[in-house]
Amino acid sequence: MNPALKSLTRLRVGQSKGAPASNKPCLILALICEIQAGHVASSRIPIDTRLVTRYCELYEIATGERQKANPWLPLWHLSSDAGPNGRLWAPVFHDKLEKIAKQFGQPKSMSDIEHRFVAADLDSALFRAAQDKPLAFEAAAVVIGQYFGHSPAAQQALHDYLGLAFSSGEYEKNPERLEEGVHEASQLQARSAAFRSLVLEAYDYRCAASRLRYISPDYRYLVEAAHLVPFTESQDDHPTNGLALTPNLHWAMDNHLIAPGPDHKWHVSPTIDALVSDNRWLCELDGHPLALPRDSRWHPAQGALTWRLDHLQR
């Protein structure tokens, strides 16, 4: 077995209900997914929303108890494990905290983690292994077999998740492929997952209309990824054909009651009676600027915005 992968069989995990605790194994799987998706470019791993969300998703699949994921625990305790070249996981502490970090004790929240460090160094050999797709698959299989052997259902669900994550990651690394038409039904789920991931991250999980941003304690998002030109018509899952919207505004746009225009402003259908108080939440949106991603690569396509405005109910 590859030495980097062998180190994954020796994680120091506790026990939960008579089986290995899922925290550290799920964090390792999350790291493998993020590296394969191209969102981690070096062995210095940012502790960001993407990684923590991925971990919570995997923990929920493995245990069915997302609210107990407590991501701060594996992010802290993984540093006690050995990798092929030394420490498997080494937090990069903020200035002046390195010498006193151990005095803080166990963190009790993600806020505690962020006050201590926002990145950690993954063992370089393990990072290189996770970059190689066949080795990454093997590493995931080692982790799943070693720590989830007590539950065949969890093993299968995790393998299914990893398969989709790796396929979606290929699109995330090559978003231009999301503009191509779909030729195989097996592509749809991976494309959809990549579209959602890229759009929500581009908008920093903030609604492009209301500007609301909320991430729950177990890392679920208020916003959804909405197509500008419907996929059934465009076959286009590129993030420039999408916006992040709250569910109610996603519904309103899909029903052509509101539309973002090429002028980067929101427009409200004249069929909505502004004198009805229940309609105020929509009418007040008229003329408001469209919130745009910071990265201009992901700004909505002008043609897609024109399509939306052209299809506004008149």
Image (cartoon, rainbow, N blue to C red):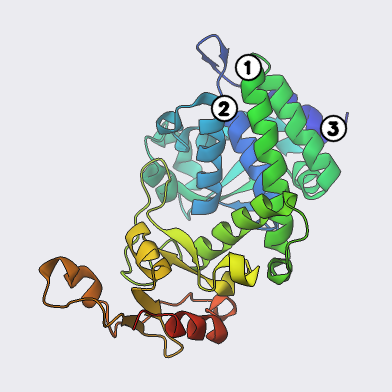
Q: Position of residue 243 (x, y in %)?
A: 47, 69
User: Front-most of 146 and 106?
Assistant: 146
**Residue at 88% across, 28% down:** 1
**C-alpha span from label 2 to label 3:** 26 Å
Mark 1 Cα shell of 10 Å, populated few (<14), some (14-19), many (≥20): some
Mark 2 Cα shell of 10 Å, populated few (<14), some (14-19), many (≥20): many
**Residue at 43% across, 61% down:** 205
Quadrant of residue 136 in the image?
top right
Residue type at mark 3: give it. Answer: Pro
Residue under numbered circle 3: 3
Q: Position of residue 146 (x, y in %)?
A: 71, 21
Residue type at mark 1: give it. Answer: Ser
Residue 151 shows which numbered tag? 1
Residue under numbered circle 2: 62
Q: Residue 77, can we see it? A: no
In the rendered view, tell whether residue 23 sits above or below residue 240. Answer: above
Tag 3 near tag 1, CB within 8 Å = no
Q: At numbered mark 3, what does the secondary structure look like: helix, strand or loop? A: helix
Q: At numbered mark 2, what does the secondary structure look like: helix, strand or loop? A: helix
Tag 2 near tag 3, CB within 8 Å = no
Nearer-N-terminus badge (1/2): 2
Nearer-N-terminus badge (2/3): 3
**C-alpha span from label 1 to label 2:** 9 Å
Q: At numbered mark 1, what does the secondary structure look like: helix, strand or loop? A: loop
Residue type at mark 2: give it. Answer: Ala
